[in-house]
Amino acid sequence: MKKMDRNHFIKTCGVSCLGLIAGASFLESCAGVQYVNAPIRDTFLELPLSEFQLPNESQGFRKYVVVQNEKLQYPISVFRNEDETYQALYMRCTHQGTELQVFGDRLQCPAHGSEFTKNGDVQNGPADENLRLFPITSNENTLRIDLS
């Protein structure tokens, strides 16, 4: 059996631990995405507020959900802020129309790398226009996203 020197062992273990931590963080962010098929009534997409609740109430709430409907060409990401206000953003890149992906509190275009904040502002180009925001009204149980 070949012996490993102490420095090599510590270096190998350190790199492995960092890889495990990074991998766990990545998987946690992927597992947290909630996709919802929501109905459209008149010109409003209706999203139950319960979609933001995590399975274990002590864990708090989801920071965002991705809402879909067969009548929409692109999904809509809805972000929940700490103060229980919401932002609804059309997930269409303003550069060339590619569907965006959500990563934490930002949206990213897989085609050319444009990035947007959860408020729809361009963070990195080549896109130079902000995302479309939808007005939202709510009652105690439902968000109504105005698509008009």
Image (cartoon, grey):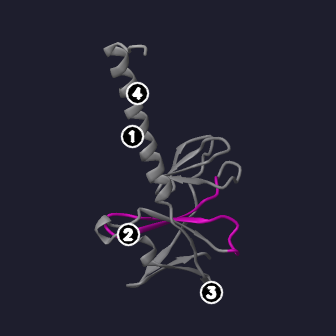
Q: Earlier in the sequence, mark 2 or mark 4?
A: 4
Q: Is residue 44 visible?
A: yes
Q: Residue at x 41, y 62 (%)?
A: 63
Per the image, the residue denoted by label 1 is: 21
Give the percent coordinates (x, y) of residue 109: 62, 48
Q: Residue furthest bottom?
A: 42
Residue depth check, mark 2 versus mark 4: number of the one nearer the observer = 4
How far separated are the C-alphas under marks 2 and 1?
Answer: 31 Å
73 horizontally vs 114: left or right: right
- Residue that label 2 marks: 85
Q: Quadrant of the C terminus?
A: bottom right
Query: SS class of the residue under badge 3?
Result: loop
Residue 78 sits above or below residue 113 on the image: below
- Dot 4 surroundings within 10 Å: few (below 14), some, or many (20 or more)? few
Q: Residues within 10 Å of mark 3 (few under 14, many from 20)?
A: few
Which image quadrant for residue 90?
bottom right
In this picture, which residue range is highlighted in magenta?
Answer: 70-93
Q: Using the numbered discs, state the Cα–Cα distance from disc 1 to disc 4 in whole angstroms.
A: 10 Å
